Amino acid sequence: MRSIGSVPVPIAGIGCNNFGRRIDEHRTREVVAAALEVGATLFDTSDLYGDGKSEEFLGRALGARRDEVVIVSKFGMRTPAEPLTGGHPAWVPRACDASLRRLGTDRIDVYLLHQPDDATPIEDTLSAMTRLVDDGKVREIGCSNFSAKQLEEAAEAASEHGLRRFASVQNEYSLLHTDPREEVLPACERLGLGLMPYFPLASGLLSGKYRRGETPPPGSRLAGSQERLTDERFDLVERLAAFAEQRDHVLLELALSWLASQRVVATVIAGATSAEQVRANTAAVRAWKLEDEDFTAVDEILER
């Protein structure tokens, strides 16, 4: 267990962007049941996913076991009613109440602004999110897709106006997308933010399911996106897989354990469309505690 602010969180979580989009309610129940079974008890959803069905399916699948889990949800990317914008203080409570109804719960454990809203001063959004915490509808607040500069500005605004500070940030981060290491990770360290990486498997490219020269499996995330399956990326994936195999691990374990072994990472949220994926991903997160020499060797591979 780690923490996001005052909320204890498991190192292995479930990304729920497939619920209501790539899998139906029955399959969602299977995924949720498997997650509860293996202790992957953080569920990351959004009012955007499945046009709201992700939250609905998750809430019904949890049922009476809601208190056993951490629910993370997001707002601000789904288009609000005109003339409001995603972070507008008049939209924030409406978005939250709608998510609470869909989830069938009285609180969201961690509530995130899904993307920056350049049309709204961050202190206005933070003020509305602070009221949600004061009203008991939200336990901790955070953001997603923020740059280091935007994180600093949000922290300064919170201090200046006596508002709740973001406790977490959710940005894309994986062995194939390491940009956050330049500025966002140091900002998280300075500000005490827990990072929740999304796309930790680079849309499945780090799972081992794709092969050079082969058509992506039907229904997979990269089906129809073969322009992303370049020789350069496969070269890197194959070098990483070889590194893992030399240490009696597989690529999936390297990809997820590499993230979990970083202290700034609060939880690793991998999406799943089946119970088998849940079990495999959760085991992989916990499979390998990378040491300094492992990180150094991986860095050398990435730099090549």
Image (cartoon, rainbow, N blue to C red):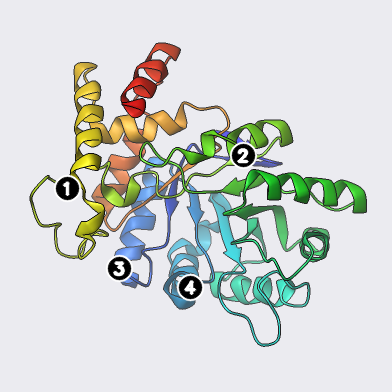
**Disc number at residue 101?**
none
Image point 19% across, 32% down: which residue?
Answer: 238
Mark 2 touches mark 1? (CB < 8 Å): no
Residue 218, image x, y percentages: 15, 64
Q: What residue sits right under mark 2 in the picture?
A: 194
Q: What residue would you read off at disc 1?
A: 210
- Report the number of discs: 4
Q: Amino acid at mark 2?
A: Gly
Distance from the alpha carbon under mark 2 to that under mark 4 = 26 Å
Residue plotted at (53% across, 44% down): 196
Q: Earlier in the sequence, mark 4 or mark 1?
A: 4
In space, the residues marked 3 and 4 are separated at their CA atoms by 13 Å
Q: Nearer the viewer, mark 3 or mark 4?
A: 3
| Residue plotted at (40% across, 16% down) | 296
Secondary element at image label 4:
helix
Instruction: Using the image, tell me which numbered label, if any, was put on residue 56.
Output: 4
